Amino acid sequence: MYGALWRVLPGPWWVRVLILLLLAAAVLYALVTWVFPWVDTIVNVQEATVEE
Amino acid sequence: MTSDALRPRRRPRRGVSVIGVLGELLITAGLLVVLFLGWQVWWNDIVVGGQQATAAQELTEQWGPIESAPTPDPSADPQDYGDPVVSAVAAEHSGFATIYVPRFGADWQRVVGEGVDMSEVLNDTTLGVGHYEGTQMPGEVGNFAVAAHRQTHGGSFNQINQLAVGDPIYVATADGFYTYRYRSTEYVLPTGVGVLDPVPQVENAQAGDRIITLTACNPLFSTAERIVAYGVMESWQPRSAGPPAEIAHFFSGAA
């Protein structure tokens, strides 16, 4: 999977590394901005209150 | 270009198999889970904590400027301003007070919202600390009980276990400043609602003290228990008297 991605990318190795880093940054941004907050609403494990 | 020309020579690779792809997917999934946890208990606490602190600053600015200068001499005996003014109960989920605990950090400040609803108050990026409905208001005889997360969503009470006897807990409202002193900590089960009684853990007792109760979860990374910190009100000053010296820097912009 990642091997195929590496082969699909154009250019010399350092261009590919650069593209991969940019891709990783974009994925991380999307995760932090949209995915993680959404997951957080589903797995709301933190409780702080006392109740009966 | 040359690399493209070479590509057709490629022989089938051992790595490209169902098992191989599955393995990479699983590694990716594991990495995502670790990333999520890091985001949840660390990065997002910093981000949301900052937002909640900013919201507290904005709320105090909404209350308008303080005419007089801050209390000049912190070592002087606190002046007696009589019985504290008790604000009317705020609308549900609205922020009505700010809270300052120097032990949590010199710049630590949060808005106290009405109610302890998880999504509406405790998880909210403009609130973070919730006032248990039905418990007393700041300065009122009885128990001003609040809850906040210890981790996640700003982790407002992250350092609740660090409080030392005598530590000040300041609460500000549009009416004035209420100085509480931390007294003790108790650990209860999540059902231990006795901590919210006007006299904590004593049912139907006649309240005489002005108590503040902070609750959060315990231990860290768990929801098995609740950690409960109690404080007793020491003094009160109207807004016109200015903030206590230790939190005056939060109000310098408004002075």
Image: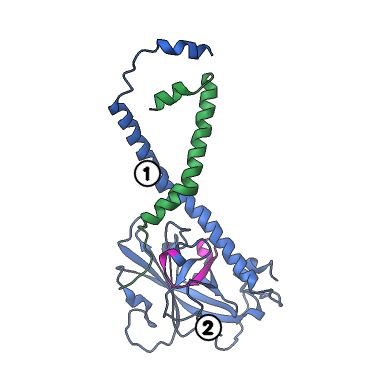
- Label 2 Cα crowd, 10 Å radius (few <14 / some 14-19 / many 20+): few
Give the Cα separation between the discs numbered 2 and 1.
Answer: 45 Å
Q: Which chain is green?
A: A
Q: Position of residue A29 (x, y in %)?
A: 51, 43
Instruction: Please determine if labels 2 and 1 lie on a single subunit.
Output: yes
Which residue is the site of mark 2? B88
What residue is drawn where x is 45% and y is 81%?
B136
| SS state under label 1 | helix
Q: Position of residue B143 (x, y in %)?
A: 43, 80
Q: Position of residue B84 (x, y in %)?
A: 55, 85
Q: Nearer the N terminus, badge 2 or badge 1?
A: 1
Quadrant of res A6: top left
Q: Is residue B107 visible?
A: no
| SS state under label 2 | loop
- Extent of the magenta region: B102-119
Which residue is the site of mark 1? B33
What residue is drawn where x is 61% and y is 70%?
B60
State the hue of chain B.
Answer: blue
**Residue at the farthest left position:** B19
Residue B204 painted magenta: no
What residue is drawn where x is 55% and y is 81%?
B235
On screen, residue B126 versus residue B221, left or right, reads right
